[in-house]
Amino acid sequence: QQIYFKVCSTFDSTDRGNIGPVTEALMDALGCDFTIACPAFPANGRTVYKGYLFTGDVLLSEGSMREHPLTPMTDPSLVRVMQRQCARRVGLIEHAVVRRGSAAIAERMAALRAEGTAIAIVDALDDADLHAMGRAFAALPVLTAGSGVAIGLPANFGLAPSAAAAELPPSSGARAIVSGSCSAASNAQVAAFLNRHPGRGFAVDPLLLAAGEDLAAAALAWAGSKLGEEPLLVYATAQPEAVKAVQAALGVEAAGALVERTLARVAEGLVGRGVARLVVAGGETSGACVQALGVKQLRIGAQIDPGVPWCQAFTGEGRSLHLALKSGNFGGADFFDKAFEVLP
């Protein structure tokens, strides 16, 4: 058995966590004295070199994540980022070691452990690196990683690739999208959807939320007569100026929580009204919606874009639901329409 603490490939967090504290809590619970942390996902342009996280060909701190409204990432050094969040010592397994294969990685892990390092950031530039890491990590009780590292793990459990593993039951029911991310990618996706589907979007204005308006009820009332085969979109995607204004009024955490609670109510209400094919954009929004729906586990299906699959879920009431949960920064501009095109 191995616990996989899946984190975003952009390592979204603050100096208070949650990546470091959760990793250490898992280590404590499992009696583990050493583990790794690696958000690399080369297929999506996320690579780690010398401990620095790159998105595409730029450092994390030079891209759009620098302006993230909740977790601005201004330091690309994952060793420094993780060390600020952890009581344990954080080290690095450099790419020169990773490229030599799983035996070299295992040897370096043993050396770091002997030196008193408890958590190692691991470099990775391509899928070959991830496969080598997977073999080296077979005996670790817990891993902290983006979804990329998972591609090297199934063989450790005697599992072979199978197309049948991604098959989900046929889908039916109304289609909807809930978007709470303010990332550049999600902004582009919302704009592309609204351009292709005029009149099929409802904007949740954070400033009106802060003023006390019940926009969840308003969104559900608007959606009532529009639910069907053509998808609709409820979004709180906002420009940085609007986000900063709400944060100034309520505080950063309270502003984010207000939007998340509202969109979670919308998602729950949409599913209650017959939506059975739902896309949720934004990491925090996805977490809030999954909790509101009472989802406890997901059966993973076909990939829409790298790192974003359709899943089958069951709500707390036992209702079957096709669900796609998307990190704000993932996917092309046409992601929302593409998602429904690939769903059987």
Image (cartoon, rainbow, N blue to C red):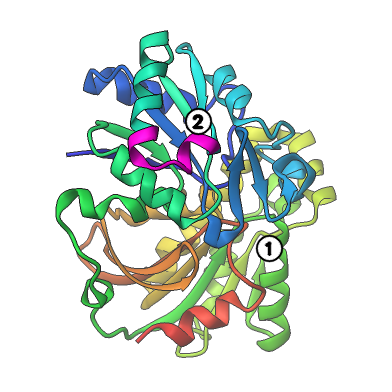
Q: Quadrant of the C terminus?
A: bottom left
Helix, strand or loop at label 1? It is helix
Identify the residue at horizontal 62%, vertical 33% (top origin). 50
Q: The residue tagged with tag 2: helix, strand or loop?
A: strand
Residue receiving disc 2: 121
Q: Amino acid at mark 1?
A: Ala
Residue toward you, 332 or 134: 134
Q: Nearest to the eye among marks 2 and 1: give it.
A: 2
Task: Give me the residue at 69% from left, 60% from top.
Answer: 237
- The vertical placement of 337 against 324, above or below, is below
Question: Mark 1 or mark 2, which is nearer the start of the sequence?
Answer: 2
- Numbered range of the magenta stretch: 96-104
Q: Is residue 15 left or right of residue 276?
A: right
At which x and y percent is residue 219?
58, 68
Q: Is residue 246 visible?
A: no
Residue sitting farthest toward the right = 241
Q: Amino acid at mark 2?
A: Ile
Image coordinates of residue 153 in percent, x first then y, are 29, 50
Q: Quadrant of residue 110?
A: top left
Q: How many marks?
A: 2
Residue 217 falls in image quadrant: bottom right
Q: CA distance from mark 2 to mark 1?
A: 27 Å
Residue 68 is inside the magenta segment = no
Q: Is residue 283 visible?
A: yes
Q: Main secondary structure of the magenta part?
A: helix
Could you tell me if the residues under marks 2 and 1 are in contact, i.e. CB atoms within 8 Å?
no
> What residue lies at 16% left-to-right and 50% top-to-bottom?
157
Residue placed most toward the observer, 234 or 42: 42
Q: Is residue 323 above or below residue 114?
A: below
Q: Residue furthest bottom?
A: 229
Residue 248, given in percent of the width and then of the height, sits at 79, 34
**Pointer 1 residue:** 185
